[in-house]
Image (cartoon, rainbow, N blue to C red):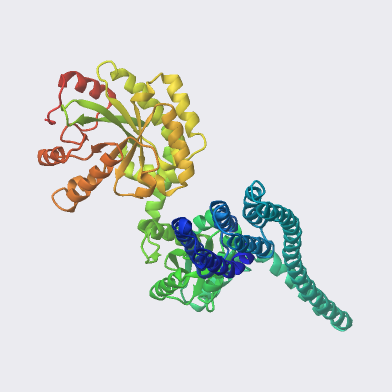
């Protein structure tokens, strides 16, 4: 519909301009010259806008999948405004011009109305609206005139307008039916082609079956063997990629390992995991994800040479290379990564990039057992993914020990709450205005098998295993319970860190409600700290969660500001109260950190937020931040994190303002 309208519009715009110019400058009516010139100028401006819109459609939209409804509305508005201009011209001049000029004007208006029935036939609103606006208002004015000839022209125009509406309606129906029929025919032709191809394929299969039937008497045993082999292949191949599935690959690797032992040559096993594939599945759908996997599969197949390759999991592949040394395996892994990372383009307007992490394990260097080799290569792959470097990682005993330690920590974390191994400590947040305590941040500590485990270590493990959901709920509840013990002696807020995994979990809001209800902790004193990385997730979901949090009068702080997503377009549309400047910038305040801090303070002020600087260790840092206008400060300069007992004593001792830690 839009294409038809725009294809017909250029001539209409030209004729409109020509007709308007002839009417304005072709007849001498001194008392109307000013009105005519103003009218002609507005008409010319309108036609320039429509002409610009036409060329925009011709150069930018035609032939693409553009927004048809919006473009159609834009065209209709331009056409109807043009009709209004013509109707206004008739209304303004009809009672003040001569018979010839009026007749000439009515002829032009009638001709345009007649042309609109065809030119605008693909839009009911445009066609009927255009002719109605042109004819009915001016006809009614002429009918009401005291001049007999104008009455006749008005009656004729009114009658012509009714005829044009009826004619336009029929033309519109015909045009729309033609459009539908054209597309329906195109679909039928496409279906006929597919059916023809299918018939050809079936005929080909029938011919092949016929040939097989003729041969079956002489080669029955061979036929049975081939059928059995095909069934075996189907049961051993991954249906999407046609690579070995896990079971078949394991058997094939056992065979390669046996041959390598007999020939006394090494065997390299590469475990390949795609980076960013989940985001493609989530954003573009599993159909696109499957197409990407097929393309990646073909690229990896080119790398296998005389080895074997299989699909180990969703986006995981295993490549076995007999006779490869460690150095050769690393080079092959590097080349495989580069091959996978090449841009994937399909459907004209879709271009994707997928990375890869690769781990390498060697036989007999690391193990003679297939499953163990794959496990070791998997461990090395995770180390590569964690390091976020483009260099494949070779398995080592150190990596195994680290993986075993991580697994011990993961297992320990699953029982940490029940075993009372978790503890909260609190670090004061100081107001720069009066040096008094403005709040406390709750920090989680874990003592496992008699040793303190750093939060930098165990928090990511908890997030990866989803244990952060239960641990985060415990932290929130325990912090609110502890905070009630100092609320009588301090009006400070309670800051609690919330993991991105925890925040986006479906049960988070229920957990928050349960804690506030059970502990009776004042929600206006609770401040939830979230990292910038959460803004890289679904904006709508994050915005909805933050709004629901604020409906409960709980405030929100952005933690580690400047180190994460840092999208101003996101920050200015999402609700939060506090910006917390990361300690890495504080540590470099004398260098580039100072400029970043000032920029963060400016952004925070523009967004109406308070600022907290963390990690302050020296008086010089505190003085510099105070001069920059930071609202609150936190760090060892004022106090180290303290457990609840120590904290209560600390609050009693300070008696008002905090100086520096002794």
Give the image location of residue 501, x and y in percent. Answer: 45, 42
Residue at position x 51%, y 78% in the image:
263
Q: Is residue 449 left or right of residue 71?
A: left
Closer to the camera in the image, 218 or 444: 444
Quarter in which the C terminus is drawn:
top left
Q: Position of residue 351 (x, y in %)?
A: 50, 67
Percent x, y of residue 413: 42, 38
**Considering the image in quadrants, where does the N terminus appear?**
bottom right
Q: Nearer the viewer, residue 3 or 636?
A: 3
Q: Quadrant of residue 165?
A: bottom right
Q: Count the numbered circles shown.
A: 0
Q: Work out whether 447 lies above or below 378.
A: above
Q: Residue at x 24, y 37 (%)?
A: 612
From what the image shows, is residue 655 above or below residue 620?
Answer: above
Q: Residue at x 76, y 65 (%)?
A: 181
Residue 652 visible from this viewpoint: yes
Q: Is residue 418 visible?
A: no
Q: Is residue 121 left or right of residue 660?
A: right
Hey, which quadrant is residue 37 in on the image? bottom left
Q: Nearer the viewer, residue 189 or 343?
A: 189
At x 51% / y 70%, what residue is drawn?
59
């Amino acid at each position: 519909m839009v294409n038809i309208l725009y294809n017909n519009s250029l001539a209409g715009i030209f004729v409109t301009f020509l007709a308007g110019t002839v009417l304005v400058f072709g007849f001498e009516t001194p008392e109307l010259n000013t009105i005519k010139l103003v009218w002609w100028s507005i008409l010319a401006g309108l036609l320039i806008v429509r002409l610009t819109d036409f060329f925009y459609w011709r150069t930018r939209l035609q032939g693409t999948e553009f927004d048809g409804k919006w473009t159609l509305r834009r065209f209709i508005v331009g056409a109807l405004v043009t009709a209004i201009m013509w109707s206004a011209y008739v209304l303004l001049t009809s009672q003040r011009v001569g018979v010839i000029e009026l007749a000439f004007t009515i002829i032009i208006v009638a001709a345009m109305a007649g042309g609109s029935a065809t030119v605008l036939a693909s839009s009911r609103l445009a066609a009927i609206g255009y002719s109605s606006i042109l004819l009915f208002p001016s006809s009614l004015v002429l009918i009401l005139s005291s001049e007999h000839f104008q009455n006749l022209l008005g009656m004729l125009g009114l009658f012509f307008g009714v005829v044009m509406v009826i004619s336009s309606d029929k033309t519109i129906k015909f045009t729309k039916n033609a459009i539908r029929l054209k597309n329906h025919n195109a679909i039928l032709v496409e279906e006929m082609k597919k059916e023809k191809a299918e018939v050809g394929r079936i005929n080909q299969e029938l011919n092949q079956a016929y040939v097989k039937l003729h041969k079956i008497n002489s080669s029955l045993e061979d036929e049975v063997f081939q059928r059995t082999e095909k069934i075996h292949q189907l049961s051993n191949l991954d249906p999407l990629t046609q690579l070995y599935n896990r079971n078949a690959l394991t058997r094939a690797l056992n065979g390669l390992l046996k041959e390598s032992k007999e020939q006394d040559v090494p065997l390299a096993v590469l475990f390949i995991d795609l980076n960013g594939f989940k985001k493609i599945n989530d954003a573009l759908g599993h159909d696109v994800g499957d197409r990407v996997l097929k393309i990646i599969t073909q690229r990896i197949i080119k790398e296998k040479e005389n080895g074997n390759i299989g699909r180990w999991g969703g986006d995981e592949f295993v490549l076995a290379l007999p006779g490869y040394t460690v150095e050769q395996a690393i080079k092959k892994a590097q080349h495989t990564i580069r091959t996978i990372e090449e841009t994937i383009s399909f459907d004209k307007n879709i271009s994707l990039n997928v990375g890869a992490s690769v781990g390498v394990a060697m036989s007999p260097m690391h193990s003679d057992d297939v499953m163990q080799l794959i496990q070791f290569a998997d461990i090395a792959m995770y180390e590569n993914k964690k390091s976020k470097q483009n260099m494949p990682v070779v398995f080592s005993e150190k990596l195994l020990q680290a993986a075993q330690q991580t697994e011990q920590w993961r297992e320990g974390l699953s029982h940490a709450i029940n075993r009372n191994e978790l503890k909260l400590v609190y670090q004061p947040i100081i107001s720069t205005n009066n040096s008094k305590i403005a709040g406390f941040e709750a920090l989680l500590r874990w003592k496992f098998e008699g040793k303190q485990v750093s939060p930098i270590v165990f928090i990511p493990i908890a997030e990866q295993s989803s244990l952060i959901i239960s641990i985060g709920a415990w932290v929130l509840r325990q912090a609110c319970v502890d905070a009630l013990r100092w609320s009588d002696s301090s009006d400070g807020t309670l800051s609690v860190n919330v993991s991105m995994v925890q925040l986006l979990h479906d049960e988070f809001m229920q957990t928050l409600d349960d804690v506030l209800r059970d502990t009776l902790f004042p929600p206006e004193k609770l401040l939830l700290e979230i990292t910038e990385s959460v803004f890289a997730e679904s904006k709508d979901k994050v915005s909805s969660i933050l709004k629901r949090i604020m409906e409960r009068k709980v405030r929100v702080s952005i933690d580690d500001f400047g180190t994460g997503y840092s999208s101003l377009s996101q920050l200015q549309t999402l609700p939060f109260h506090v910006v917390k400047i990361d300690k890495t910038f504080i540590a470099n305040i004398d260098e580039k950190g100072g400029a970043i801090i000032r920029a963060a303070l400016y952004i925070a002020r523009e967004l109406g937020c308070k600022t907290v600087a963390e990690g302050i260790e020296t008086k010089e840092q505190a003085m510099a931040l105070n001069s920059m206008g930071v609202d609150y400060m936190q760090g060892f300069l004022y106090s180290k994190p303290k457990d609840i007992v120590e904290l209560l004593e600390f609050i009693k001792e300070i008696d008002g303002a905090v100086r520096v830690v002794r």
